[in-house]
Image (cartoon, rainbow, N blue to C red):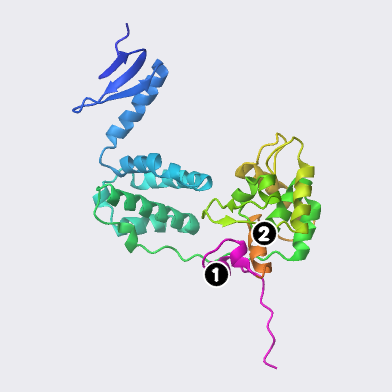
Amino acid sequence: MKRLPTRVYLKHNAYYYVTLPDRKWIRLGKSEAQMYKSLAKIADLESSRGTMTEYFIRYENEVIPTKATTTQKDNLRELLNLKRAFGHMNPESIKPKHIYAYMDARKTAKVAANHEKSLLSHVFSYMIRWGIVESNPCREVKKFTEKPRTRYIEDSEYFAFRDFAPPMIQAAMEVAVITGLRRGDLLSLKSSDLENERPIVTNKTGKKVIFELTPDLMAAIKLAKATRVMPSIYLITNKKGLPYSLSGFSSNWGFYMKKAVETGVLTETFRLHDLRSKAGSDHNQGDRLLGHQDPKTTRRHYERKPIKVQPIR
């Protein structure tokens, strides 16, 4: 029989690792490959004991899975950068000056830096809850000032690209500009959600929105269904009848947007998310349409249409 690694035992056809000093048995798996893979993770965790890496891992395992799917993906990407910068440090040694130094190093990507700083702050909040630290050094660090995106999609641009794009993108555009839904919520929509006027729980905020089945929305649903190659419960689908991934849809959108500029259909590109802003700008109750509790959020980030005013004389 092969010699097993230190404190690893074979019991009931599975491998276990026994911790010291509490002698807790941790199941590693049934095969040798699983055993060594699990053992490597334990070794990484034990070597990082007491450093930020340990608490980043705990946050990743306990907190991130409770968030919306899109947020989980964003957080995991952001956490990689934070691990590289702060993973080797002890929590008590991290001061505002270290966080400011990180922000300065990321000043060419200010939006990303702000998101990463917010995530680090949230990690520290949980570390206070876990009894690891007494205070959060991120609270003393100011974010970069972000300029709200001001691109407003004129009707002429919208219709020019809609008529140029393939039916699937046309359908997504129509539903997006009518409902103002975020991209993730749009791509996960089921036909029955709209047709039966069911409450749609938005992914980011958890707000419930019911859309009245207007003639325009009915036409958009009909168009979306007509583009489907395979039967599906979802509204916007790929060739397999499955909802598009964010990256898959973005790839298609980018391809046709680039072609539209190259052929002169458009003079400037725009994003699918800009249609959410167009919906908020064009609707007389934009804050309610977009599910914002505070109308200031709508005005600051989504109302981009130029305001027409009457001169004093």
Q: Nearer the viewer, residue 9 or 138?
A: 9
Image: 238 above or below 34? below
Examine the rendering and report whether any part of residue 265 can be seen.
no
52 displayed left or right of 183: left
Residue 76 covered by magenta stretch? no
**Residue in the foreground of this view, choosing between 207 and 140:** 207
Say whether marks 1 and 2 touch (CB < 8 Å). Answer: no
Report the number of numbered marks: 2
Tell me where residue 4 appears, x and y as whole percent: 30, 14
Check disc 2 and report its element: helix, strand or loop. helix
What's the magenta region?
285-313
| Pointer 2 residue | 275
Return the residue at label 1: 295
Badge 2: residue crowd in 10 Å (few <14, some 14–19, many ≥20): many
Please tell me whether residue 296 belongs to the stretch shown in magenta. yes
State left or right for residue 217 relative to residue 2. Answer: right
- Asked if 99 appears above or below 46 in the picture, the reply is below
Residue type at mark 1 is Pro
Q: Quadrant of residue 138?
A: bottom left
Residue type of the residue flagged with mark 2:
Leu
Front residue of 210/288: it is 210
In the picture, the quarter occupied by the C terminus is bottom right
Q: In x, y percent, where is residue 308?
A: 69, 79
